[in-house]
Amino acid sequence: MNSRIEINGAPVEGQERILTPEALDFLVELHDIAAGRRAELLQARQELRDKIGAGFNPTFLEETKHIREDDSWRVAPIGPGLADRRVEITGPTDKKMTINALNSGAKVWLADQEDANTPNWQNVIGGQVSLYDANRDQIEYTSPEGKEYRLQVPYEQTPTIVMRPRGWHLEEKHITVDGERMSGGVVDFGLYFFHNAEHLLSVGRGPYFYLPKTESYLEARLWNDLFNHAEQKFGIPGTIRATVLIETITASFQLEEIIYELRDHMGGLNAGRWDYIFSIIKNFRLRGEEFVLPDRKQVTMTTPFMRSYTEQLVRACHRRGVHAIGGMAAFIPNRRDPQVTEKALAAVHEDKKREANDGFDGSWVAHPDLVPICREEFDAVLGDKPNQIDRLREDVVPDDKSLIDLKIEGGQITEAGVRTNVEVGIRYLEAWLRGNGAAGINNLMEDVATAEISRSQIWQWIHCGSKTAEGQTVTRDWIEQLIEEEFTKLPRTEGDKFDNARKLFEEVALADEYPAFLTIPGYDHYLEN
């Protein structure tokens, strides 16, 4: 093994196929390209966040105006297996969830090593093992209860896999190079590409990725440089396709620039709605009531600033010849409560119908039962066409001011909404600490992004002195009282992680200084392996 790299995680079943000497050498190469620039980019993020907090309103960039105004450039051709993306299912990469996703009937599976995945060592490496086996049509699983899971359809009918590595902000503490932690995203990308790229091309697909938490075109440029190095090393240039999640407010001002930087590898942009809301709260948290959002459930995709963001995204994508993918339908059908399920399914229909009619080429669901609903709504618009990239949204005018006009008519903060944030935040973090990055809570599939909204809203409401509709000022003392009340209602069991979940929630929701991501202290101080 390369003497510069050190592995300190406990053995994981199947890791000998993943952590080979050659794969680790490849990780060192990627680390050398990324480490210094990654640190500079993270510093630039913080500087811009501080600037916005001090009163600066982000806008379209003057230095990249020539890219936006040049009508001549387009992206590389669509990768094999990616032309039709009308319904995509998301989920973590453990064996059971991998098989369920591949049996779902979706066109694409977002194999999530990020927000729906707790980054403990078992999940990081176990997920790579699952993907290795899935790509070779040799995955199966038997649950502790004896239930067997196998692929129910031929491999060529399974969804095209698009793997989501971790974002630039997250590190991998179990792999160090010269004593420095590697970027979690570089680890995830590097291992997946090394073991699967050539095989995927041999079966008519390709090495495809979803890039999360991107905040600028320069961050996209670093990914592109890593892609170029990987392709050149293996002699397969131009084969990677990357779909970038536009889930930060700063990235929404650089849509075409991000596409441009990845134009030789561009697979599309996705409207990552929950992280986008989190990013708005984070960046404008100190700007006063004008930038305070109401209860999470009132921030819908039809609110003006969210609609502006999604329509400008579709316009940018189709102008450059690339897919625009819609946001998550997080509802989990509850067969024990048909009335709730019927109402929620109607809302999913409406959400997907709106996206299809707005020009999106596909959208996300979190549960297999929602695949037919999403397909139905996109079938109604697409028909036999694989996508509607040729539908240019020339009626949409780029507008920087509308992206940060956060007024929501009738929006309110309610005590029920505050309590929901506390409950969901703690319950999700408890699941995360147990290794489950996607947790069903109150008939919704919650992941890190929704937990980030929960704790960030509470932090902002406290520091802005916001009032609820009932007239209660949101103070730290009042939130501590609600935390205690909600904590006593939780379903405690032997060996649960609720005590640490509460500590972590209080740390990231009540701290004097705002933590940029809850996963960083969670990973460093509370996650056990």
Image (spheres, rainbow, N blue to C red):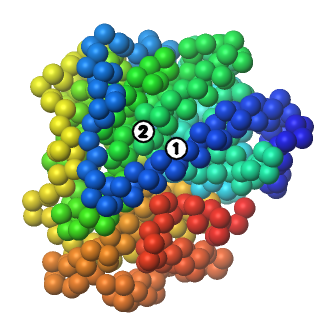
Residue 190 point in image, percent of width and height: 68, 33
> Around disc 1, counting alpha carbons within 10 Å, would you say few (fewer than 14), some (14 to 19), or many (20 or more)?
some
Name the residue nearer the viewer: 233 or 239.
233
Left or right for 381, reference 110? left
Determine contact: label 1, label 2, CB under 8 Å.
Answer: yes
Residue 188: x and y in percent read 64, 40
Report which quarter residue 466 is drawn in. bottom left
Q: Does 202 appear above or below 255?
A: above
- Residue 455, horizontal then vertical, whole percent: 40, 69
Q: Is residue 257 visible?
A: yes
Q: Residue at x 39, y 58 (%)?
A: 50
Q: Which mark is residue 41?
A: 1
Q: Residue at x 41, y 83 (%)?
A: 483
- The label on residue 216 is 2
Q: What distance separates the C-alpha of mark 1 from that of mark 2?
A: 9 Å
Rendered location of residue 286, percent (x, y): 31, 67
- Check disc 2 and give the amino acid type: Ser
The quadrant in which residue 226 appears is: top right
| Quarter of image, res 214 | top left
Judged left or right of residue 399, residue 495 is: right
What residue is shown at x 58% (from left), y 26% (from top)?
225
Viewer-proximal residue among 177 and 97: 177
Would you say 311 lies left or right of 210 here? left
What's under tag 1, amino acid-wise? Answer: Leu
